[in-house]
Amino acid sequence: MKQSWKMVGTSALGNALEFYDFVICGVFIAKISEVFFPNTTPTIALFASIFAFSAAFFTRPLGAYVFGLIGDTFGRKVALTYSVMLMGFPTLIISLLPGYKTIGVAAPIILVLCRMIQGLSTGGEYNGAAIFAIEHGRSDKAGLISGIIAGSCMVGAVFASFAGSLMLRPEMPDWAWRVPFLIGALVSFMGFVLRKNAKETDAFIHIAEKKQQQKRPMKVIFQKHRGAFLMNIVVGIFKGSLTYTVFGFMNVYMTKFLGYDMSTAVLLNTFGLIGYTSGCTFFGWLSDKITMRRSVYLSCFLCCSLSYLCFYLLQTQDLFLVGLGQYGVGLYVGSFVGLSHVYMQVLFPAETRYTGVAVSFSIGIAISGGFMPSVYTFMTGYTGNLYMAAVIISIYAIIFTLISRVYRHKATLYSPAPHYSEKDDKDNTQEQTYQQIA
């Protein structure tokens, strides 16, 4: 069991390092708009930089398919080892990339291409890290492990946010924003070493021993698991609408609509990221205790109720209350994200799990995650309603609750830790997992 928790820790650390690279672009989104889109109005430059940030979501489904195929054919470890390296190279390029004033239109084009490559990497990394960790754990701890992996993403984001609060200060030189990107490229190598020395999951070893790898996992998924695939797309849409309020929209909301300078906004956003991390871990653990179904409904209730209170606190101009509001936003977002990994994984058997979860989730996150910062920004500006993001989140939560209630009666569920069930006691573990969800 110590070895299992070691693998969970390794997976979480590698995930944190990769998400530092992914999120750092969002933290410096206002600065990027100045450097790479200077010959436009400030509003257009901001929207252009948000589009550059969102470009990574368009390539996530392709990355999910490629790395999912690798993960289901050659192993989870192989897929994760090379996905972390694929994140590091574009981060290094961005750290050294001259601005628009130096190389003209080539600068924003290269920036967008780098973000698209990062999206390929994230498509294989995000869900793959959770699959790797949960398959190393125990079925009765799957929710907690899910929360730890989800929260580890924001550990990387917290460091990215902290770097932003330092490098965006007025007294810092104009090139200081490049330093965190350079650091991100270096830590990718650390992630590569961690993954290279990790142990493959028992689930995949068992599949390989019986030669049950799927050469065409998507074909099997569409034949046998279409419902699960569609449900995971819905999870991705809801999760994207939540997650990118924390590190895609909050900085814009604080600066554009509430008048804070960027350094202060990024520093305050750190409280939201901390709330996210603690919410992921706590509600992941709670899902092991009160059943997954009740945890999902509790999360949706919190999204509907806490969102309005938190956005009220953000408008008070009292730094303590604003920080509390940021923490609250992160907490209710984490309440769903923390349990979402195991929620998705039990819908697929181990033979097609990597591909099924990664591709369907990436499609969903591309639909909502990439566009939501722009949607929140546009709707808030157009209506003048500073609660518009809370309204949209509530609508998403209600819709997801209704869909999940309908789908749970049709679901076939599999153990999230297949090495407990597929060797010895499959029927018993699968029923235990069903009780956790239903």
Image: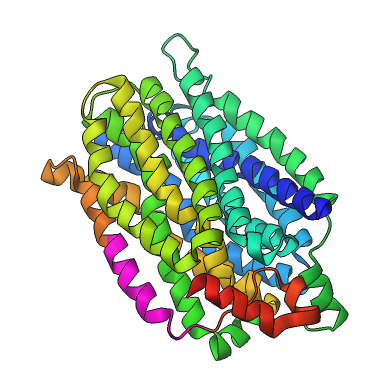
Horizontal side of 16 relative to 321 (left or right) equals right
Main SS category, magenta section: helix
Residue 107, placed above or below residue 437: above
Q: Is residue 234 on the magenta stretch?
A: no
Of 13 and 163, the residue lying toward us: 13
Residue 70, given in percent of the width and then of the height, sits at 72, 68
In the picture, the quarter occupied by the N terminus is: bottom right
Identify the image quadrant of residue 419: bottom right
Of 429 and 201, the residue lying toward us: 429
Residue 112, given in percent of the width and then of the height, sits at 48, 47
Residue 113 seen in render: yes
Residue drawn at x 82%, y 50% is 2
Q: Residue furthest top?
A: 171
Residue 278, given in percent of the width and then of the height, sits at 51, 41
Residue 392, placed above or below residue 157: below
Residue 192, given in percent of the width and then of the height, sits at 77, 46
Magenta span of residues: 396-411
Horizontal side of 235 relative to 395 (left or right) equals right
Identify the image quadrant of residue 152: top right
Residue 367 seen in render: no
Residue 276, placed above or below residue 266: below
Q: Is residue 403 on the magenta stretch?
A: yes
Q: Residue furthest bottom?
A: 223
Residue drawn at x 64%, y 47% is 15
